[in-house]
Amino acid sequence: MKYDIILAGVGGQGVLSVSAIIASSAMKEGLYVKQSEVHGMSQRGGAVLANLRLADAPIASDLIPLGSAALILSMEPLESLRYLAYLSPEGALVTSTNPVVNIPDYPDLEGLLGHVRTLPQSRLVDGENLARAAGSARATNMVMVGAASHRLPVKVETLEHYIQTTFAAKGEKVVETNLRAFRAGREAAA
Amino acid sequence: MTDMVLLGDEAVAVGAVHAGLTAAYAYPGTPSTEILEYLVRYQKKHGGPHAAWCANEKTAYEEALGVSFAGRRAMTSMKHVGLNVAADPFMNSAIVSINGGLVVVVADDPGMHSSQNEQDTRYYADFARIVCLEPANQQEAYDMTREAFDLSERFKIPVLIRLVTRLAHSRAAVRVRDARPQNPVRKPPVASSWILLPANARRQWHDLLGRQPQFVEWSESGEFNRLRLNEERRNLGVITTGIARNYYVESLDELGYQPSHLHIGAYPVPVELVRRLLGHVSRVLVLEEGYPFVERMLRGIVAPDIEVLGKESGAVPPDGELTPDIVRRAMGLRDRRGQEIPGLSLPNRPPQLCTGCPHADSFDAVKQAIAGFESAVVTSDIGCYTLGALPPYSAVESCVCMGASVGMAKGASEAGLKPALAMIGDSTFLHSGVAPLMDAVAANTDMTLLILDNETTAMTGGQPTILPPSRIGKLVLGLGVDPAHCHVITAHHRHTEGNRKLIRKEVEYPGLSVIIAVRECVETLKTKKKAS
Ligand SMILES: Cc1ncc(C[n+]2csc(CCOP(=O)(O)OP(=O)(O)O)c2C)c(N)n1
Ligand code: SF4
């Protein structure tokens, strides 16, 4: 089994936390994991990309080859379309519909969402509203983990466990908000 | 033995601790920063080994060298261009007889994700005639770091570890072993081997050259360089170095057979293994991250009698970083296709200054202050503020290397571009801006230096600057800058009008002025608030 995930978003959206939670869960369940991150210059409000590779045998490359990702999971609609060349013909795209407009030439949002809908397997989720309802717009990234959870090769309980441990230091309330966000995302994409 | 999940950078840090590290020194730089960050956290938690940020890579290197002199194990880590700054101690420390193990970790950035160039550090190891290790994965980063300390003491040379971005910033499980204790303090047994007066230096250099065959023999017989010959098929041999092996292995199944393969993880190049491979095949493909270092050796000046494929033949692009897909193509496999929406073109999303960044307010004030001058020049430097070169600011005209803004403004002014204004960050100023400012003081150059003091090294994630902000003004005055032309201002849009006037007045003054624009980076401010 091989499961390659492209994680996309804008600097500051919590792409690396998403990557860490899925990676820890996969490792807990005995899978091999490679998790390639972007640090440095591009984190400053620019496009952020992480490569996450899960497999039941050792993984050689830290980078995902073209056409082989099973999933693109994006925190932002424009960013979700940037890495299509990596998505395998059977692969799925799951993205939040909420744009981060910090460039002057941001395209028409309806047009972007329309493009996403033309893909063979895609899922649009209003991450920000669901996160707000769960207690904080900052939990949008956990909504998106929930929305992707049906497709990930790891158990829901394991993901929830690592959401708990990730946010434990920030207190019970933050943990609860993020768990609620995760479940809301899971339900929305059921 | 236990498993830890580590970045390539962190695997180096843990490897060093387990090798009996006594002290580590560094100046931040992507993609090497996380090595010392890990060690700083480790020291806080466990009380040691000593881990310290330094003014620049040269001072970091020399402090590590002092630890080695004392017989204990030391590490210094930096990004590739950092070794240019530390080149002087690096080249000369290759000649002394290293006492306690000295490991120099240099992280290259092929593809220039966060750098001004993509220089290949393996040339430096060759230049200094020392040993270099190039891990291919996180496990090797750990194992090789441990080994590097032993090698350094065995061969009495600094040992270089070359990382690249994709390993430095990728995480995987690493199996770690028991830690070795630190060395006791013990001065070098032969004092003259550390005093590079010409007579001693000649002897030491001669001795280092004499030991080269020993290094090659080690590299040929060691576990890091492995040759596997395919007795049946002689049509292709492959040489991989470092992480290029991962991309090769990724697609190997599809090739349908296993070509003869030499993997190089340790330098000097294992000459005998290369000869055996080349004698066995009719064509060789060289896959290496960075410059065509091994490939050019194979080609030499007299053409070898077999075909060499690589960056110089066009089989692999000459610049940028390798990817699994570039390597597939070089292996003769067909390209893989993903999904596509015909006609879709997306705008780029370049990095930008955070909302509320103090630099933005400085750019506004400077742009207004120099408006109307015919031949003004604004040189700049490296840091978050380099983004001032992009719209909407388009406020600066140069970014070359750490500290260059100061010397370049001096030169440009002396050549006739006036007013000349240099913009430099506080950390960059303390790294390499002080010496050129001394030149400007000595010459009373007609130029203005604007030090952007956001109280941190923001670009690389908010490491502390080596002097607290309040000391920069005193330092500048101590160099002899006229107090009447040295000012501290607040970089805030509430003050833009006053700042504009002051900058205007100082650029019009026909001598040296220094203005320190102070306001804390909003990111570090946020992090501090969260922590408290
Ligand atoms: C020789 C060298 N060392 C390190 C770096 C990496 N680097 C680039 S900018 C920078 C620090 C910038 O800090 P500062 O000047 O305070 O500006 P800020 O980012 O805080 O605005 C560092 C460490 C480099 N490019 N070259
Ligand atoms: S990190 Fe700090 S210095 Fe860098 S852009 Fe953001 S506010 Fe400005």
Image: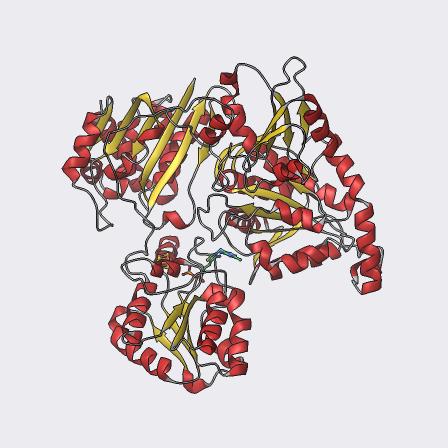
Q: Quadrant of the C terminus of chain B?
A: bottom left
Q: Residue at x 70, y 51 (%)?
A: B128
Outermost residue on the top side: it is: B232
Q: Position of residue B353 (x, y in %)?
A: 32, 56
Q: Quadrant of the N terminus of chain B?
A: top right
Asked if A52 appears above or below B372 in the picture, the reply is above
Q: Position of residue B382 (x, y in %)?
A: 44, 60
Q: Position of residue B31 (x, y in %)?
A: 50, 47
Asked whether the viewer can see residue B21, the reply is: no
Asked if A82 appears above or below B361 in the picture, the reply is above
Tell me if B129 is positioned left or right of B519 in this view: right
Tell me if B437 is positioned left or right of B380 in this view: right
Asked whether the viewer can see residue A121, the reply is: yes
Task: Determine the image quadrant of residue B149.
Answer: top right
Q: Residue at x 43, y 25 (%)?
A: A54
Viewer-proximal residue, B120 or A26?
Answer: B120
Viewer-proximal residue, B57 or B95?
Answer: B95
Q: Position of residue A144 (x, y in %)?
A: 27, 33
